[in-house]
Amino acid sequence: MESLKKYIKSLAAASVIFAIVGFGQPGAQAASIGMGSVGSDVTYVQSILKKLGYFNTQTTGYYGPITTEAVKQLQRDFGLEPIGGVGPQTSKLIQEIEMMAHVVYGESRGESYQGQVAVASVILNRVDSNEFPDTVQDVVFQRNAFTAVNDGQFNLQPNDTAYHAVKDALLGWDPSYGSVYYYNPKLATDQWIFTRTVTKQIGNHHFAY
């Protein structure tokens, strides 16, 4: 829960959205959407809510009572004021969940669910660490930080499992035990990574700090 508290503080401090899809462009101020809104932004929000298990019907592009209640539940779960509309803080949360899901799917889609949650946890642990950047976007796109970003697998469309793994990591489950690195010892070519202290092995990945 400590990681989630720190994460919520970062959301509260944010006033811009770094988008990979959906709302606007990087650095653009997000426009609030809510009851009565229509269009592609609404469809995008509904699609992410559906992947996370909050929106259990077809996406429509119309922001009505069902979407409002789904957004409220998301906001409650992540410690945001349950206003039901999507403003800057909720937009940033959705965008960062999306980025993390792309990393999880690109890096660990063949691993167990626990292994995927652990990969998501490593991202959050790096945000919390003084040795790494302090935002999800900067951690994800730090040079050579993630193979999936370098080789293009980041651009694959994540499945629902990847989104749920991110959700569980954000809500406090850390199977990596605080790790800030993970690697496949059969594939790793940088000998430096073998000097790190391993906390746990999950599937093909060693998690370390």
Image (cartoon, rainbow, N blue to C red):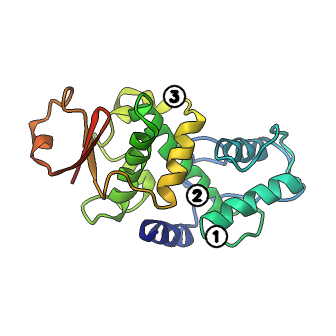
Q: Count neighbours of disc 3 (C-alpha within 10 A) and say few if under 14, some if 14 to 19, many if 20 or more.
A: few
Residue that numbered label 3 is attached to = 156
In-front residue for pair 29/21? 21
The residue type indicated by label 2 comes to Leu
Q: Could you tell me residue 166's position as x and y percent? A: 50, 48
Q: Does residue 209 appear to the left or right of 153 in the view shown?
A: left
CB under 8 Å between discs 2 and 3: no
Q: Is residue 188 above or below residue 94?
A: above
Residue 93's tag is 2
The answer to which image quadrant residue 44 occupies is top right
Q: Which residue is mark 1?
A: 80
**Residue type at tag 3:** Leu
In the image, 18: left or right of 60?
Answer: left
Q: Secondary structure at mark 3?
A: loop
Residue 177, position as x, y percentages in the image? 31, 57
Q: Callout 2 environment at 10 Å: few (<14), some (14 to 19), or many (20+)? A: many
> Helix, strand, or loop for circle 2?
helix
Marked residue nearer the N-terminal end (1 or 3):
1
Q: Can you see residue 88?
A: no
Q: Quadrant of residue 115?
A: top left
Residue 54 shown left or right of residue 63 in the figure = left
